[in-house]
Each structure stands twice: as structure tokens, then as C-alpha cells.
């Protein structure tokens, strides 16, 4: 185990040389296993950050680790102009899971969103993209243009034209907004960065219907909700919709960077040369994804997430803490909306051995690995209760 002295060295070195784009916490993490991570001093934390929802299997799952090692000794990279065994197998698995026959493999969620916008415009011949207020879709220029938070957007304007926003959970406003120039509507089933706000089946089914009627495509952004997080393999399965384009990343490959866009039959006009990715669909990431998906299915982790999420929500709703305004969630994607800013409570939780996230200024967000034990969830709730009751 690294010494305590190394923590200050790590922090000083990273502070000196990093670009400075992240709001850093005074903590250097060096090891992880399952739902736990350790700092340089050997202190253990229950990880409810999970790489911003990436670690659905927890850290260093042995099946994924073995798959990475085996594939690294076989073939790490293979560009999309050649066929590959791992890529072929993963594409078939994604078609089986999503019900969408084709997929484009990339490296991140924001890349998946960017590609979905290109495919929607190509397929429909229309320029317009409608996104939802409070939505978050990434930080590259197209995805950023669909992201609602003005603090993310304003410094980089002018952004990509043709992208506008409508209120979430408001079918009347969406019906007015979808026009003859609308290529696609992009929605999250649960708005993550926007405060952990689940959408209703009525709203999402209505959005699908309007897209079908008006000739637009429905893009469902499941970068954060996909691969068991909400209690089903994909969150759209809760609400009975079928996306035309499905954006995936985070939990797909057990922590290895990967993204995917699944394409439905209404997506047309795709041909060689319209899009590409140097690293997308590389055999290493594909092997990790196949191993991760196998564990998700064999251990029925989506069902575990549903049961553990119900337990977590019930325990949180039983807390006697007047600072809590509302508790929302689906599966192991939980938001605690406070009557005040959440940052000081997030910092206090570190001292209690719990790592958590914000989701906007007043929401404390929990995205624990799906493999987390109930006993750890109870410890998390106890720690949250302690810090929220502090004056």
C-alpha cells in the first residue's frame, strides 16, 4: 500500500499538470474492488460514484479483468475496415439485447450522442434536433448543444445550430415543437445530471408516437441508465417504447471506455464513409463488454438493482432529516433533493467513508455498483442520515 506521503505527491503532481477542468476532492484513490475503493493511506470507501455510473459490476471484476488480459495478449486494436471476431460477437449480442439490429461502436457517451445526431440528420434529411430542459447529453459541441445547463453551454457559444429545448414531461409543448424540419427528439428515460428525474410512460410513449407521426426519429440517451442501472437491462424497457437510435456507454464494458449507438429500422441512408472512429469497436473493449454483459445476465444484476434500489429508497425515505425535500430514483440510480446546496454534505460523506455525486446544486446522487451488498447500502443510508442531521 502506498504511504501517506504519496497522497500529497499525487495531488501536487496532478494539480500542477492537469488541465484543471474538474472540481477536485482532496482524495487520491489507488485501488478498487467491488463496491469499494481505497486511498493512499489504506482507508476504504463505499463507492456510490462508480465512475459516474460506469462501474455496474464494481471495480476490477475478475471476469472482466481476465477478458482484458486474454484479449490484450491476442489483439488489442483492429480498425473498422477489417472484420473481427470480438466485434462481431458483441454486435450480435447488442442486437439481441436492444431489439435493434445494427450498431455503431465508439468510445464514450458523448460520441454516441454525436453519432446519433449525424445519423438522424442523414436519415431524415432534416436539420432540427429537439432536446429536453434539464437534459444532459455530453460536452463535445453537438452533444453540448443538446445539454440544457447554461453553465456548460454559455462559454462555448455559438453552438451547433438547429438544436433547441422543450420542457420535459410536457407533451403539449413537444407536439407544438416537432415540425417538418425536426430530424430527431433526444430524451433520457431518467434525467441523470438534471436531478435524477424519471420520465413517465405516458410522456415517453407520447414522444414516440409524435415522432412516428411527424417523421422524426426518437433518440433515447441511455448512457447513464443502460446495462441494468435502473432495474432492467435498459430503462426504455420500463416504459414500453422502442427507440430509433439508442445511445449507450458507461456500464457497457466493465470500466473500459466504450460507447455504442444502436440503430433501428427507421434509420436509413447509412453507407461507408458517413462516420467512423479510430478506436471504436477495438477488440480489447469488445472483449471487456462481452464479459461484462455475460456477468450482468448470469447474475441477473438488473433484477438485483431493482430489489436493492427499492431497499435503498425505502431506507432513505425513512430518514428523519428536514433538509430533505424529495427522494427520487429508479433501481440503483437515486437522487436526494435537498432544501439547500449539496456540496458540503458530499464533502462530509467522505469523512464517513462514502463517496457520492451531485446532480445539480441541490441533489445528492447515488450510483453504486449493482453488486453492492445490502449491508453497504445500509451503511450509506446511516452516513447520509448523520451528515444531513448535522447543523
Image: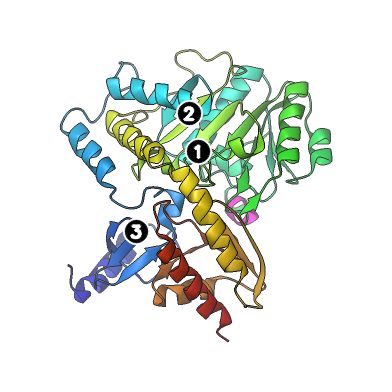
Q: Which one is in front, 372 or 77? A: 372
Is 152 included in the stretch rendered in magenta?
yes
Task: Label 2, secondary structure: give it.
Answer: helix
The one nearer the camera, 76 or 58, is 58
Please identify the quadrant where the C terminus is shown. bottom right
Which sits earlier in the primary sequence, circle 2 or circle 3? 3
- The residue positioned 47% from the left and 64% from the top of the image is 356
Task: Report the residue at 66% width, 38% height from top.
Answer: 239
Q: Point out the stretch of residues depicted in magenta.
A: 148-153
Q: Quadrant of the N terminus?
A: bottom left
Q: Which residue is mark 1?
A: 233
Q: Earlier in the sequence, mark 1 or mark 2?
A: 2
Q: On the rendered structure, is 3 left or right of 321?
A: left
> In this rendering, is residue 209 above or below 17?
above
To which residue does mark 2 refer?
Answer: 97
- Where residue 101 appears, as percent x and y from the top left, is 50, 19
Instruction: Tell me the chief SS of the magenta region.
Output: helix
Residue at image x 49%, y 12%?
A: 271
Q: CA distance from mark 1 to mark 3?
A: 36 Å
| Residue 159 shows up from this direction | no
Look at the numbered discs 1 and 2 and tell me whether their residues touch, using CB distance below 8 Å: yes
Amino acid at each position: 500500500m502506498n504511504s501517506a506521503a504519496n497522497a500529497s505527491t499525487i495531488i501536487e503532481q496532478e494539480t500542477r499538470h492537469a488541465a484543471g477542468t474538474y472540481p477536485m476532492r482532496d482524495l487520491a484513490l489507488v485501488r478498487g474492488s467491488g463496491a469499494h475503493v481505497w486511498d493512499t493511506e489504506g482507508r476504504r470507501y463505499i463507492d456510490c460514484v462508480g465512475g459516474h455510473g460506469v462501474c455496474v459490476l464494481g471495480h476490477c471484476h475478475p471476469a472482466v479483468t481476465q477478458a482484458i488480459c486474454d484479449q490484450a495478449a491476442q489483439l488489442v486494436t483492429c480498425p473498422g475496415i477489417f472484420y473481427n471476431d470480438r466485434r462481431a460477437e458483441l454486435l450480435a449480442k447488442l442486437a439481441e439485447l436492444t431489439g435493434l439490429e445494427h450498431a455503431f461502436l465508439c468510445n464514450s457517451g458523448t460520441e454516441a450522442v454525436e453519432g446519433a445526431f449525424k445519423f438522424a440528420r442523414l436519415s431524415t434529411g432534416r436539420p432540427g434536433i429537439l432536446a429536453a430542459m434539464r437534459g444532459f447529453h455530453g460536452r463535445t459541441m453537438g452533444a453540448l448543444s443538446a445539454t440544457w445547463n447554461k453553465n456548460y453551454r454559455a462559454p462555448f457559444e455559438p453552438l451547433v445550430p438547429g438544436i433547441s429545448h422543450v420542457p420535459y414531461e410536457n407533451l403539449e409543448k413537444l407536439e407544438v415543437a416537432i415540425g417538418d424540419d425536426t430530424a430527431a427528439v433526444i430524451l433520457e428515460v431518467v434525467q441523470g445530471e438534471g436531478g435524477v428525474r424519471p420520465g413517465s410512460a405516458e410522456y415517453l410513449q407520447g414522444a414516440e408516437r409524435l415522432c412516428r407521426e411527424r417523421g422524426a426519429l426518437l433518440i433515447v440517451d441511455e448512457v447513464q441508465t443502460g446495462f441494468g442501472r435502473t432495474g432492467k437491462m435498459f430503462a426504455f424497457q420500463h416504459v414500453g417504447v422502442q427507440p430509433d437510435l439508442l445511445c449507450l456507454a458507461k456500464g457497457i464494458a466493465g470500466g473500459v471506455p466504450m460507447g455504442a449507438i444502436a440503430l433501428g429500422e427507421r434509420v436509413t441512408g447509412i453507407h461507408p464513409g458517413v462516420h467512423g472512429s479510430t478506436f471504436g469497436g477495438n477488440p480489447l473493449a469488445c472483449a471487456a463488454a462481452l464479459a461484462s454483459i455475460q456477468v450482468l445476465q448470469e447474475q441477473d444484476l438488473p433484477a438485483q438493482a431493482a430489489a436493492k434500489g427499492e431497499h435503498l429508497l425505502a431506507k432513505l425515505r425513512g430518514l428523519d432529516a428536514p433538509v430533505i425535500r424529495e427522494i427520487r430514483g429508479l433501481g440503483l440510480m437515486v437522487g436526494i433533493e435537498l432544501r439547500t446546496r449539496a456540496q458540503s454534505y458530499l464533502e462530509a460523506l467522505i469523512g464517513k467513508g462514502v463517496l457520492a455525486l451531485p446532480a445539480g446544486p441541490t441533489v445528492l446522487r447515488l450510483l453504486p455498483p449493482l453488486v453492492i451488498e445490502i449491508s453497504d447500502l445500509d451503511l450509506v443510508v446511516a452516513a447520509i442520515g448523520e451528515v444531513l442531521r448535522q447543523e
